[in-house]
């Protein structure tokens, strides 16, 4: 359908705009992809080269924080998931995803993520609640 055909257009704009650095148009396109296809994470991961990973991790963290601040909790969790997929044991992403899960009401998931962040980088984040 029309929505599915639009996905490559938004993806191309994200990658072109991403070359110039993070910006609101890039975030808007990412949000549009999430509207059109909530399971769109598969569009990103295979297309990111190893040399681009640090930059994209930064983008996903910035987008996640922006979405969290705007109240788009599921989108924020998606962004933090992507940062974790790309970087692995990334304490900041676990901490932020835990904050998003807490806002969503997933207290167990929030505690798991905050514990992981604390263990990866003790002292950088508050100790998880017991």
Image (cartoon, grey):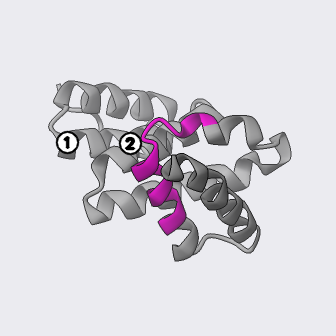
- Asked whether 14 falls inside the magenta stretch, the response is no
- Residue at 44 percent across and 28 percent down: it is 119
- Residue at 21 percent across and 24 percent down: it is 108
Mark 1 — residue?
104
Of 95 and 59, the residue lying toward us: 59
- Residue 67 drawn above or below residue 121: below
On the question of residue 90 being in view, the answer is no
In the rendered structure, which segment of residues is drawn in magenta?
A: 28-42
Q: Position of residue 106 (x, y in %)?
A: 19, 32
Of 103 and 74, the residue lying toward us: 74
Q: Is residue 42 left or right of residue 127?
A: right
- Residue at 15 percent across and 37 percent down: it is 105
- Residue 101 drawn above or below residue 66: above
Q: Position of residue 27 (x, y in %)?
A: 51, 65
Local SS, label 1:
helix
Mark 2 — residue?
77
* Badge 2 density bin: few <14, some 14–19, many ≥20, Cα 10 Å: many
Quadrant containing the C terminus in the rendered view: top left
Disc 2 to disc 1, C-alpha distance = 10 Å
Instruction: First in sequence, mark 2 or 1: give its number.
Output: 2
* Badge 1 density bin: few <14, some 14–19, many ≥20, Cα 10 Å: some
Q: Is residue 43 left or right of residue 32?
A: right
Q: Is residue 75 left or right of residue 10?
A: left
- Residue 111 drawn above or below residue 75: above
């Amino acid at each position: 359908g029309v929505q599915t055909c639009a996905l490559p257009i938004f993806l191309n704009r994200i990658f072109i705009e991403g070359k110039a650095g993070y910006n609101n148009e890039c975030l808007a396109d990412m949000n549009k992809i999430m509207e059109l296809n909530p399971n769109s994470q598969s569009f990103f991961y295979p297309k990111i080269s190893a040399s681009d990973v640090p930059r994209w991790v930064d983008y996903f963290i910035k987008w996640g924080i922006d979405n969290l601040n705007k109240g788009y909790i599921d989108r924020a969790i998606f962004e933090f998931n992507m940062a974790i997929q790309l970087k692995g044991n990334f304490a900041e992403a676990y901490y932020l995803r835990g904050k998003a899960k807490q806002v969503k009401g997933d207290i167990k998931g929030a505690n798991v993520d905050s514990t992981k962040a604390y263990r990866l980088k003790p002292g950088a984040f508050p100790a998880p609640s017991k």
